[in-house]
Image (cartoon, grey):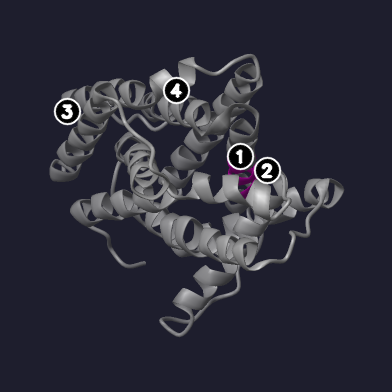
């Protein structure tokens, strides 16, 4: 396994978070253009993610056969749960509520699990960064979330389930971080197998048009193969809580994407939230060796 330094790991997570920031928008568009539900989108995301990751790594070093192990099974099931739950949260309550609840709860769950399961100390720097990141996330997305109506309750439940699943995969992968590439590919395959029966019942074939095909390819290549490959590599060098906090940069990327591509406007409070989130990410990236 190639050694990844703490500084490089922080860069990997930052790039992954930026890529993830576009995944929610791509999935939401696929609900409309591809006539797919949350399970179908997640299934295609994992299948294409595994294929792209295999292509990206083909020839760089031999691809050894892997067998189904408890580690891959746990990772794949966790990925299937949290990815589908996140898209379900978007479908029920919109991107804003899904983002603020999922991303706000994830680092809290991860910090608790890291402290009590992995025995990783929180530390003052990480604790301060966590507080700043959560405050920034609330400022960035809180107003939109508060405007949601009754449908948000189901969305909040799915978002909390997604956060718990994401935290579990992060903690488990941090403990078993010997083969990040194999973990990513195996997790995608196991996750797809878990989702296949539900996708077949719900509708697995997308409407074939230029937009839906382009969105599926993008979702599989960038927010999935690239982002998760970097994410699992970073877990070999950084603490689980540090990775989860830096991942909150995803919310900033999603917000800026809305401004640049969809003409959305951010309030002064939302811009302040972006600043707090980015400050937390920068601090942890600079202090990656000790965070």
Q: Residues under labels 3 and 4: Cα distance? A: 30 Å
Check disc 3 and report the residue beneath it. 125
Task: Tell which of 123 and 35 is nearer to you.
Answer: 35
User: Callout 1: few (<14), some (14-19), or many (20+) C-alpha neighbours within 10 Å?
Assistant: many
Task: Tell which of 207 and 251 is nearer to you.
Answer: 207
Q: Residues under labels 1 and 3: Cα distance? A: 32 Å
Of tags 4 and 2, which is closer to the observer? Answer: 4
Of tags 2 and 3, which is closer to the observer? Answer: 2
> Which numbered disc, 4 or 1, marks the residue that appears first in the sequence?
1
Classify residue 97 as left or right of residue 137.
right
Q: Is residue 80 magenta?
A: yes
Check disc 1 and report the residue beneath it. 87
> Which numbered disc, 4 or 2, marks the residue that appears first in the sequence?
2
Over which residues does the magenta segment extend? 76-83
Magenta stretch secondary structure, dominant: helix
The local secondary structure at tag 1 comes to helix
Check disc 2 and report the residue beneath it. 38
> Which numbered disc, 2 or 1, marks the residue that appears first in the sequence?
2
The local secondary structure at tag 4 comes to helix
Point out the residue furthest to the right here. Answer: 201
Answer above or below: position of 127 versus 95. above
Check disc 4 and report the residue beneath it. 144
């Amino acid at each position: 396994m190639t050694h990844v330094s703490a500084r490089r790991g922080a860069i990997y997570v930052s790039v992954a978070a930026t890529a993830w920031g576009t995944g929610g928008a791509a999935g939401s568009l696929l609900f409309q253009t591809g006539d797919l539900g949350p399970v179908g989108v997640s299934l295609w995301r994992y299948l294409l993610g595994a294929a792209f990751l295999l292509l990206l790594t083909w020839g760089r070093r031999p691809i050894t056969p892997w067998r189904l192990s408890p580690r891959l099974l746990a990772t794949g099931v966790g990925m299937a749960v949290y990815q589908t739950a996140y898209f379900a949260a978007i479908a029920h309550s919109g991107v804003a509520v899904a983002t603020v609840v999922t991303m706000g709860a994830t680092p809290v769950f991860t910090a608790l699990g890291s402290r009590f399961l992995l025995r990783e100390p929180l530390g003052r720097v990480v604790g301060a960064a966590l507080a700043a990141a959560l405050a920034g996330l609330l400022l960035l997305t809180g107003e939109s979330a508060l405007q949601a109506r009754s449908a948000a309750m189901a969305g909040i439940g799915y978002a909390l389930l997604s956060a718990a699943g994401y935290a579990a995969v992060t903690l488990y992968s941090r403990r078993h971080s010997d083969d990040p590439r194999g973990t990513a590919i195996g997790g995608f395959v196991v996750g797809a197998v878990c989702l296949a029966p539900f996708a077949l019942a719900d509708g697995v074939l997308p409407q074939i048009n230029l937009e839906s095909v382009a969105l599926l390819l993008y979702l599989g290549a960038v927010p999935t193969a690239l982002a998760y490959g970097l994410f699992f590599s970073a877990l070999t060098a950084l603490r689980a809580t540090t990775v989860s906090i830096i991942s909150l940069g995803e919310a900033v990327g999603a917000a800026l994407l809305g401004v640049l591509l969809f003409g959305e406007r951010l309030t002064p409070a939302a811009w302040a939230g972006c600043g707090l989130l980015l400050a937390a990410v920068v601090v942890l990236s600079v202090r990656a060796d000790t965070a």
